[in-house]
Image (tube, helix red, strand yellow):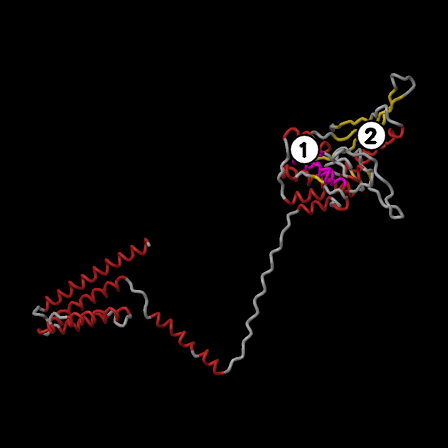
């Protein structure tokens, strides 16, 4: 068995015959719209039955009171007005959910030639399964088409909820799809702020002042502000336009800048062209010069230090034997040792050259006059000791250099 709800129309006794006819017509219109739309959209309640019922008047014999009943689908849930009172203000995400859901319903209603005219929180029901429904189609109006002369063929009746209706509806003028969008926007800012419409409307400036009471994105705020404009043709003209405005806008990437035009070659005399070509071999020779001086390995550095110390010791013995201790002998030793260091740095002598030079110097010291009275083993021992000292000093300074370069 389907759950349903029965809605009874029982007008108050102080209505004039004309007002009673209007009220009865609105009730019947709701039934017609629900029958037309409810069965075709999942967010509009289905109409199950609509019938009149005549009952005898107990106070006046012979007179009957007529009642009208509308039986429709029962939505087991809570309307948004009750939800606002229960949980407090809605977040932007929750309001966007309501907005997107109602825009789809309104798009369907408007495309079928109707305007709801009474959108407010109490007419939007959330089912326990989360689905949102649009209720109360008693104030619905068929969209007015233009007559032959191009003027509107009719005005709307003054049926609206105070605070939610736009100016054209309150004045009884023609209503449009943007009329429903206005009421939906008022509903949403009420959910966002928790304030009644009259608290948010600035009658002096004829505008809505709701932004200070909530924080939302500029995209949503701009859409709501446009829906709330007092002039119908300034608002969005359809629910689809609102949905399009809410879509994230993807900015296309900027095209890459065009490549710069190649420089225009300037004509030059033949002599100037030769002067440009001639330096090229010089530029090509520079890497070859730099390749002659690669950095020294640790073993090369220590071998060079040992060789320099060994040679320096032998030269000192020879020059002291020949010239004695004098500034000349010391200066010559310093110059020769400096020359040995420079030629090693420039890699003029390296590798086997060091052994050959050391051997030649040692052979010269076989001459007794150049040995300073020392034996051959003594000369060799002196050279080896000085060379070892040079190696030790070089290793010590290299270690100090590495430590300083690490911490500085």
- The residue tagged with tag 2: helix, strand or loop? strand
Where is residue 379, by image quadrant?
bottom left
The residue depicted at 40 percent of the width and 76 percent of the height is 282
Task: State the image coordinates of residue 133 (x, y, percent, origin top left).
Answer: 72, 35
Where, by quadrant of the figure, is residue 376 drawn?
Answer: bottom left
- Pair 1/2: label in front: 1
Relative to 81, 36 lies left or right: right
User: How many C-alpha atoms fall within 10 Å of the one at disc 2: few (<14), some, or many (≥20)?
Assistant: some
Q: Which residue is mark 1?
A: 195
Residue 238, placed above or below residue 286: above
Please give the name of the residue rendered at 82% of the width and 31% of the height, measured from the top-left corner: 27
Nearest the eye: 343 or 291: 343
Residue 234 in the magenta stretch? The answer is no
Instruction: Note whether 395 is above or below 338 in the view shown.
Output: above
* Quadrant the N terminus occupies: top right
Please provide the residue range marked out in magenta: 179-206
**Which comes before the other along the chain, label 1 or label 2?**
2
Q: Quadrant of residue 177?
A: top right
* Up/down of 322 relative to 184, above or below: below
Q: Main secondary structure of the magenta part?
A: helix
- The one of 211 and 350 positioned closer to us in this rendering: 211
Identify the mark at residue 327; answer none if there is no mark. none
Q: Describe residue 156's horizontal placement relative to residue 278 as left or right.
A: right
């Amino acid at each position: 068995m389907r759950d349903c709800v029965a809605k009874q129309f029982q007008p108050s006794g102080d209505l004039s015959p004309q007002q009673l006819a209007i009220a009865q017509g609105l009730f019947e219109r709701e039934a017609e719209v629900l029958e037309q739309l409810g069965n075709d959209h999942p967010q509009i309640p289905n109409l199950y039955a609509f019938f009149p019922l005549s009952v005898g008047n107990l106070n006046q014999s012979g007179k009957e009171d007529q009642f009208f009943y509308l039986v429709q689908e029962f939505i087991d849930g809570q309307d948004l007005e009750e939800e606002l009172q229960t949980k407090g203000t809605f977040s932007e995400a929750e309001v966007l959910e309501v907005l997107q859901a109602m825009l789809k319903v309104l798009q369907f209603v408007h495309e079928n030639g109707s305007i709801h005219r009474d959108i407010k929180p109490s007419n939007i029901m959330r089912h326990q399964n989360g689905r949102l429904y649009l209720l109360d189609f008693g104030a619905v109006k068929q969209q007015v088409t233009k007559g032959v002369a191009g003027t509107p063929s009719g005005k709307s009746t003054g049926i609206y909820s105070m605070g939610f209706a736009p100016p054209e509806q309150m004045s009884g003028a023609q209503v449009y799809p943007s009329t429903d969008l206005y009421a939906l926007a008022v509903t949403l800012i009420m959910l966002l702020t928790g304030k009644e419409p009259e608290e948010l409307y600035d009658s002096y400036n004829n505008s809505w002042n709701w932004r200070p009471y909530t924080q939302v994105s500029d995209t949503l705020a701009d859409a709501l502000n446009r829906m709330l404009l007092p002039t119908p043709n300034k608002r969005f003209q359809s629910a689809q336009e609102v949905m399009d405005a809410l879509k994230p806008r993807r900015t296309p990437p900027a095209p890459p800048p065009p490549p710069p035009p190649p420089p225009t070659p300037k004509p030059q005399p033949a002599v100037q062209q030769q002067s440009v070509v001639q330096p090229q071999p010089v530029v090509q020779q520079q890497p070859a010069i730099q390749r002659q001086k690669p950095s020294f390995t640790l073993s090369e550095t220590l071998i060079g230090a040992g060789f320099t110390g060994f040679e320096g010791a032998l030269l000192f013995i020879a020059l002291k034997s020949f010239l004695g201790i004098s500034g000349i002998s010391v200066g010559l030793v310093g110059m020769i040792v400096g020359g040995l260091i420079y030629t090693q740095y420039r890699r003029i002598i390296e590798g086997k050259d060091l052994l050959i030079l050391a051997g030649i110097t040692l052979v010269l010291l076989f001459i007794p006059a150049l040995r300073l009275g020392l034996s051959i083993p003594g000369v060799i021992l002196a050279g080896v000791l000085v060379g070892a000292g040079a190696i030790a000093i070089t290793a010590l300074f290299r270690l100090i250099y590495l430590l300083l370069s690490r911490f500085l």
